[in-house]
């Protein structure tokens, strides 16, 4: 029996894999503290996707209009290294880009960014977490002085008011929701508030559902603060002793009267007051959020506006309370720890901070000044770089940008202009395969060993339990081999992922995410553990790492948390006369992202057989649409076609489509053909959740 982790979402449920008649069975791990034996349909069916459509050998073609031919690793690696050296010499290191994934193990992240940021001297290593939770990273850093969700899943069972905003937890983080819902059934006094433009399965069981207009989250959050201040339901002692910026914050929220906020959000004043009363009356408020908050041009501000409410009421650092962002991917958190975004270095360090760069350069045995002081290209900046012919070498691993990036037609045109794209993944075909010159077969979950960190900072060792298919190699091993061939033998002497992890944790010493007490061996022996977990004769007990800031000392220079005093900015592309509807996008219970795995699992395909567009009956009547009619959705960037689902679960003026269907799985149903690439100025996370569209009834899609 092998203990491991579900490789889909950031909940991070423990799994047990058992040999059974020459095959494998999977079940929930009752000993795993995050999930207590529960799994959702994705975890339960994971084994079915492992041997379907695997990429088994490296494949190459000179031009994108040619077919691929099988090559050996020697030729593949030789071509890559030659290309990197040529681009480095002729265009400089800023022309080299690597785009990775929250599906990486921490060891993959660590070796990839060591290669790019340390050895090659470019910070152009970004990950698809940029599209997912980089706003939460920026929000925590700005408010608390460091990244890191301060809460634990056990807080789900200790809170008396759960405030869920921009998260359809029941479908997207089902086991987190199950824990909360079970606790609520046993404790009817627990209040559940859900803020979402849709009446999602999460909202349908709430005590209070605030169906706000997309893009009005900050108005709502400031409106709650306004009322708490008006009613004097704030923790003055906490504010005085542990925060800065309160006066400026109070000055901002005085402009958010209930009448103004209710009007902007499209809700009743009563509902807003009920929400504020529930927050103010609760001893332990736990807020949860995910993409609905993060994927926004004001995503960082939304996160900070949530944290503001916790600072205003002293709801942080205590059991059952705190601002808790839920990560999308299984190891987005590991990426944050290991330097997996273009502005980060390992151990929650920043490329902009001279002492951070110097510490990492010294540790890696590289000359001073090797690491660039400037953040590298975010993934969208890589696309812009392709358009401008500034990128000469693009390496994509474990992610599917030909479906997941915004303004997809523009993205695809840019990918077609890439002089040399390496695509490293497990399956073929994937939509992005069409844009690659060189395909590298990677191992995946079940075939590789590495660690992943879930939303509650819990690190689980995911051990391999079967050999790789064909000639597939581990991602970290591919990065290391390229590094050695580029001449960095000293930096990539690793012979196992355990050695990679052992090196990485040394860079966390004394940092907020200190995990120097962890190793593959210790995780195998003790099971999944939360950081901080420093080394020492007496390692911190697991319970002491259950939540951050229990001493109410934050990672800012003065130890105080910072209020954000900023006004709401709203949507980057609000509806207007030409494009009168707001389109919002989201996820369904069974599918995972662009269906690379779940599209290959029959049970899940049957569960969600086709894409659709949700529209309110009032709008359907205006447009003359009946149930199952077809509609063409047009934005300023592209179009897609959907069967209509008329439902009161969506607010009038808003339409919803799921984001899972790329060109491989449906005809003209790509959500990101419609979205725009405007991003949050701090986190650079695009506003994938909202854009303005026209809805045009059409005959059935052929
Ligand atoms: Fe996997 Fe997430 Fe489902 Fe848990 S909730 S089984 S981690 S997909």
Image (spheres, rainbow, N blue to C red):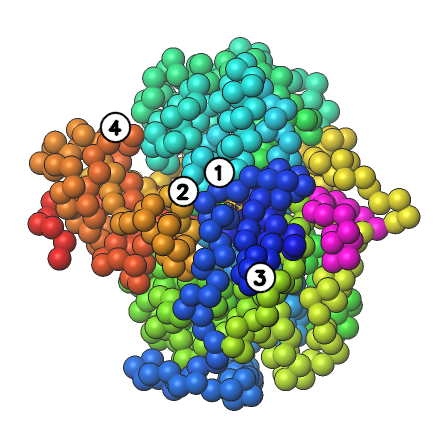
Q: Quadrant of residue 451?
A: bottom right
Find residue 589 and name its label: 2
Left or right of 143? Residue 268 is left
Circles 1 and 2: CB atoms closer than 8 Å: yes
Q: Position of residue 437 (x, y in %)?
A: 41, 80
Give the SS element for disc 2. loop
Find residue 648 and name its label: 4
Q: Quadrant of residue 243?
A: top right
Closer to the camera in the image, 41 or 333: 41
Pick the quarter of the image with the N terminus: bottom right
The answer to whether the beta carbon of the residue marked 1 is less than 8 Å from any atom of ligand 1 is yes
For label 1, the residue is 174
Q: Give the foreground label among 3 and 4.
A: 3
Find residue 238 and name its label: none
Q: Position of residue 88 (x, y in %)?
A: 55, 82
Please name the residue shown 20% across and 34% down the image: 646
């Amino acid at each position: 029996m092998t203990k491991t982790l579900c490789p889909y979402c950031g909940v991070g449920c423990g799994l047990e894999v058992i040999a059974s008649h020459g095959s494998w069975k999977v079940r929930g791990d009752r000993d795993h503290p995050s999930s207590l034996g529960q799994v959702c349909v994705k975890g339960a069916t994971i084994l079915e996707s492992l041997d379907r459509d695997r990429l088994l050998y490296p494949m190459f073609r000179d031009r994108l209009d040619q077919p691929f031919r099988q090559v050996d690793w020697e030729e593949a690696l030789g071509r890559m290294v030659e290309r990197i050296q040529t681009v480095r010499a002729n265009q400089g290191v800023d022309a080299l880009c690597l785009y990775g994934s929250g599906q990486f193990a921490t060891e993959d992240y660590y070796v990839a960014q060591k290669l790019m940021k340390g050895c090659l001297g470019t910070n152009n290593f970004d990950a698809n977490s940029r599209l997912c939770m980089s706003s939460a990273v920026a929000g925590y850093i700005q408010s608390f002085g460091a990244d890191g969700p301060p809460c634990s899943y056990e807080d789900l069972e200790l809170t008396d008011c759960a405030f869920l905003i921009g998260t359809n937890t029941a479908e997207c983080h089902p086991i987190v929701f199950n824990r909360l819902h079970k606790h609520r059934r046993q404790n009817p006094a627990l209040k559940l508030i859900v803020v979402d433009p849709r009446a999602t399965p999460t909202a349908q069981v709430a005590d209070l559902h605030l169906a706000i207009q997309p893009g009005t989250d900050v108005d709502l959050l400031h409106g709650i603060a306004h009322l708490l201040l008006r009613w004097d339901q704030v923790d003055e002692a906490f504010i005085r002793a542990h925060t800065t910026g309160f006066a400026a914050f109070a000055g901002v929220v005085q402009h958010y009267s209930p009448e103004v906020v209710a009007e902007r959000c499209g809700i009743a004043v009563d509902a807003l007051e009920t929400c504020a009363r529930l927050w103010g009356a609760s001893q332990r408020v736990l807020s949860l959020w995910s993409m609905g908050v993060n994927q926004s041009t004001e995503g960082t501000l939304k996160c900070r506006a949530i944290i503001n409410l916790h600072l205003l009421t002293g709801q942080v650092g205590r059991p059952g309370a705190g601002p808790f962002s839920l990560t999308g991917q299984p190891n987005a958190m590991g990426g944050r720890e290991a330097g997996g975004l273009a502005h980060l270095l390992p151990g929650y360090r920043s490329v902009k901070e001279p002492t951070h760069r110097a510490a990492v350069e010294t540790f890696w045995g590289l000359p001073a000044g090797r690491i660039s002081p400037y953040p590298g290209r975010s993934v969208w900046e890589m696309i812009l770089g392709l358009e401008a012919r500034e990128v000469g070498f693009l390496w994509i691993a474990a992610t599917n940008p030909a479906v997941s990036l915004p303004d997809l037609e523009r993205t695809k045109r840019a990918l077609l202009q890439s002089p040399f794209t390496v695509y490293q993944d497990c399956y073929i075909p994937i939509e992005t395969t069409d844009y690659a010159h060189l395909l590298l077969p990677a191992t995946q979950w079940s075939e590789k060993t590495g660690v992943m960190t879930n939303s509650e900072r819990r690190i689980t060792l995911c051990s391999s339990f079967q050999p790789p298919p064909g000639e597939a190699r581990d991602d970290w091993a591919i990065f290391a081999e390229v590094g050695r061939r580029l001449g960095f033998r000293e930096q990539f002497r690793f012979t196992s992922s355990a050695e990679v992890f052992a090196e990485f944790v040394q860079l966390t010493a004394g940092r907020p995410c200190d995990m120097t007490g962890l190793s593959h061996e210790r995780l195998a022996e003790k099971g999944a553990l939360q950081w901080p977990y420093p080394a020492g004769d007496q390692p911190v007990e697991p319970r002491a790492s259950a939540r951050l800031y229990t001493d109410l000392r934050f990672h800012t220079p003065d130890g105080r948390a910072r209020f954000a005093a900023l006004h709401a900015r709203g949507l980057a592309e609000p509806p207007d006369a030409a494009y009168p509807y707001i389109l919002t996008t989201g996820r369904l219970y069974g599918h995972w992202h662009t269906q690379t795995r779940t599209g290959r699992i029959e049970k899940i395909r049957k569960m969600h057989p086709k894409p659709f567009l949700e529209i309110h009956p009032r709008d359907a009547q205006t447009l003359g649409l009946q149930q199952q009619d077809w509609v063409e959705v047009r934005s300023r960037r592209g179009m897609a076609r959907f069967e209509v689902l008329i439902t009161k679960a969506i607010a009038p003026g808003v339409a919803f489509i799921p984001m899972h269907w790329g060109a491989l799985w449906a005809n003209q149903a790509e959500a990101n053909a419609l979205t725009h690439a405007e991003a949050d100025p701090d986190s650079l996370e695009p506003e994938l959740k909202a854009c303005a569209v026209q809805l045009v009834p059409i005959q059935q899609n052929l």
